[in-house]
Amino acid sequence: MKKNETRNEYRKIVSYYQSVALYHDPDMKNRSNSISFDDSSPSAILNISEVQCKDDGRYQCIVGYINSNGIGADTRTETSVYIQVMADIPEFTIQPANTTLEKYSAVILSCSANVGRPGGIVTIWKQSHISDERIQLGNSSSSVTDTGNCSDYANLLITYNLSRSDDGFSFGCTSKNKHTNDPAPSKEEGPRTILYGEDRSYETLSSGTTPRNLEERNYESLSNGMTDTYSSIDERDLRVGEGAQYEYLGSGETHTYSSIQPTVSM
């Protein structure tokens, strides 16, 4: 007997009598053979020659007999059958796909795969270029079974906020199940360069005009042991002169401001 997938009950597959096996499942009859018990052997055997995904599940054997009091009785034993399917290489993406990103910005990590059977999952992780350790960021919690294709599909979507410590890290995804041997099928993207640094605010003073606020963002990134500095000024009428002097070119008298020397932290 085999347990139904949708109901907590069993359906008969084969009934065994002495030297005779009676099939209740025509499909199983076409792809298996049965050996009934007889005087030489007490065992009843079902050999499935063409295994299909739907054969996965819980099976029960019931042995009926007449006890010493002449009363009919039975014993029941159960076992589980798992159909083993290998996991596929996952599909993995990072959005935005830029390899250079600002600290505190968010990226969306997406992974999907046929994780195989049984018990398949996908795992998203990050890894430094100086270490073999993969730091786990999340696992899929469930999968969708496609019995016809003998596949289990798992998906995982993570929004991850970058930090300065993520500079040089790669991101990836692994697909595996209970029978997957290491190294498991994986897909990797990276490494990512993370821009970081202090923010500064300046105020312009110009005759006949309202003071205007300028925002400067300084970013640093480590590359091959060197420190690169990036700056951006959020002001349309601003000119950055030699020596990092700032000039306001709006209406009225133009003023030149003192040189600003950013502090670079290693």
Image (spheres, rainbow, N blue to C red):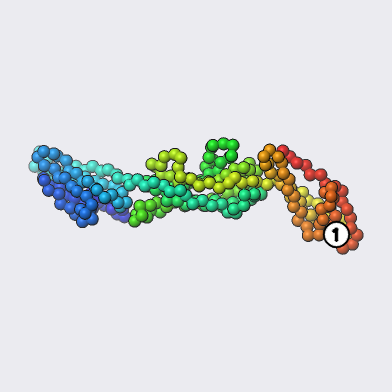
Task: Locate residue 57 relative to residue 180 in the image: left or right.
Answer: left
Q: How many marks?
A: 1
How far from the left and from the top, in percent, is residue 188? 53, 46
Q: Amino acid at mark 1?
A: Leu
Asked whether residue 99 is in view, the answer is yes
| Residue 27 image position (x, y, % from top left) | 23, 55
Relative to residue 81, is residue 134 drawn left or right? right
Query: Which image quadrant: the C terminus?
Result: top right
Q: Nearer the viewer, residue 261 or 17?
A: 261
Q: Going by the image, does 218 lie left or right of 66?
A: right
Is residue 142 visible in the rendered image? The answer is no
- Left or right placement of residue 212 versus residue 148 in this view: right
Name which residue lies at 72% across and 44% down: 228
Q: Is residue 135 above or below residue 207?
A: above
How many residues crowd mark 1 within 10 Å: few (<14), some (14–19), many (20+)? some
- Residue 166 locus on image (x, y percent): 61, 43
Residue at 32% x, 51% y is 53
Q: Position of residue 66 (x, y in %)?
A: 11, 42
User: Circle 1 is placed at which residue position?
Assistant: 249
Q: Who's the residue at 22% across and 46% down the image? A: 47
Label 1, secondary structure: give it. Answer: loop
Residue at 77 percent across and 42 percent down: it is 263
Residue at the far bottom in the pictured view: 251
Given residues 104 and 110, the one toward you in this image is 110
